[in-house]
Amino acid sequence: MSNIIAIVGRPNVGKSTLFNRLTESRKAIVDDVSGVTRDRHYGVGEWTDKQFTVIDTGGYVANPDDIYEAAIREQVMIAIEEASVLVFMVDVTTGITDLDDDIVSVLRKSDKPIFVVANKVDNTALHSEIHTFYGFGLGEIYPLSSMTGSGTGELLDDIVKHFQDEPEEENSLPKITIAGRPNVGKSSLINALIGKERNIVTPIAGTTRDSIKIHYNQFGHEFMLIDTAGLRKKTKVRENIEFYSVMRTIKALEEADVVVLMIDATEGIESQDINIFHLAEKNKKGIVILVNKWDLVEKNTKTMKAFEEAIHERIKPFTDVPIIFTSVLNKQRIFKAIEEALAVYENRKKKVPTSKLNDVMLPIIENFPPPALKGKHIKIKYITQINASSPMFAFFCNLPQYIKDPYKRFIENKLRENFNFAGTPIQIFFRQK
């Protein structure tokens, strides 16, 4: 994809604040703690009718022995490789540091346009301090305050001159969100699917703090893949950063078409998994359950069936959900999970013709009518599917207020048996004829 701005620099110079301003959002986590942005984060901005993607990178660091710092450095290198324009951000209040010089040596090897931004120029007195940065030999210095936005317009005016003019495609691709508790293997799954270390993967829980969107286009499948921060129990959400991550995850679930819920096979399905499941169900999203680390479980001929039954017991009454047993580490059945997710996406969009709906369901209802209440018989005469983003059906009858939940579940089960809505929540409404 062209028209990509990558914001690079050492930790805590204000990259995420600039990202939020360019994308007019609060997508990137902003905190005074160095190293908050660990993965690349993507957003979309617009200036003078030109749209562009912004990548907010982790702060570039020089310590190769630190597990996080080495991973962050790799992320920055990938961002530089992907971008069409590089924004190198420095801090006018601290001047040039050794780490800034290290970054410049990396940037000089790139053939991309480089814009040096001196951040935290919050008053005119600081303008005279920017001249020291001409020592980089990278051309014009752009004084800017990412906090207030001053100087942003002048920067963008010059950046967009390097953009290619091309029609922006409407993003109608399926959105698949990978969700689950921390350290269940979400980022490892995405890395295995795309065949590239796009996300930082370490054995430390909670590495992914922001949600990350990736355009997947391989093996005849095209969709947006979203990796989310691990959802923790509320009692463990102690830092502001952790709180923001939970909010990001919830928003990613709300925006998804299909949620792939990853469960750790060695721990079984836990209350937090159920919380994520019900959150997706509440938002009427398609759901696929992916049981990861299956290779670590001692198995016999009944192990898989027992595990499925345990899951069904916890998620009922909505049990019509695909369950895939996988080992991301061994790349076992990971593409099967994606195929199931795309099948659920199609189920979620499915429209059943009214004539077929009535031809199938009315005879079933006639043979198994709603039980009479207070001596009054309920007659369902007509059925139609409501035009909505997820399956919704209206059953027109004479006494809708007398139909109880057990019969609604009976109707839902018959719809599923006859029209295959696997993985998709169904809404049923009984209305006055």
Image (spheres, grey):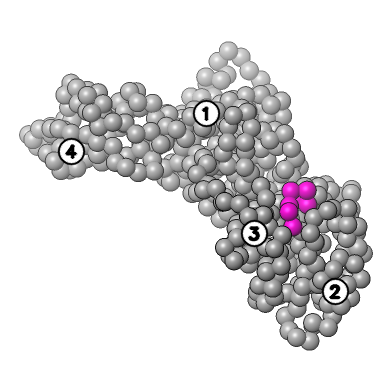
Q: Which image quadrant for residue 116?
A: bottom right
- In the image, taking residue 249 as reference, residue 117 lies left or right, namely right
Using the image as rendered, state which of residue 35 and residue 24 is in the foreground.
Answer: 24
Q: Residue at x 28, y 37 (%)?
A: 385
Q: What residue would you read off at disc 4?
A: 396
- Mark 1: few, some, or many residues within 10 Å (few <14, many ≥20)? many
Q: What residue would you read off at disc 1?
A: 340
Q: Measure how far apart labels 3 and 1 are at the Cα level.
A: 31 Å
Q: Which of disc 1 and disc 2 is earlier in sequence?
A: 2
Query: Relative to 295, is 258 above or below?
Result: below
Which kind of residue does numbered mark 4 sit on? Phe
Which mark, residue 200? none
Where does the magenta region start and end? Answer: 79-85
Which kind of residue does numbered mark 1 sit on? Glu
Which kind of residue does numbered mark 2 sit on? Thr
Coordinates of residue 186 in the picture (x, y in percent): 64, 39
Residue 119 visible in this rendered orientation of the protein: yes
Q: Which of disc 3 and disc 2 is earlier in sequence?
A: 3
Direction bottom: furthest residue = 125
Q: Which of disc 1 and disc 4 is earlier in sequence?
A: 1
Q: Which of disc 4 and disc 2 is earlier in sequence?
A: 2
Q: Are marks 2 and 3 in contact (CB under 8 Å)?
A: no
Q: What residue would you read off at disc 3?
A: 28
Which mark, residue 94? 2
Using the image as rendered, state which of residue 243 and residue 151 is in the foreground.
Answer: 151
Query: Relative to 252, is 416 above or below?
Result: above
Q: Which of disc 1 and disc 3 is earlier in sequence?
A: 3
Q: Measure how far apart labels 3 and 4 are at the Cα level.
A: 48 Å
Which kind of residue does numbered mark 3 sit on? Ala
For mark 1, give the secondary structure.
helix
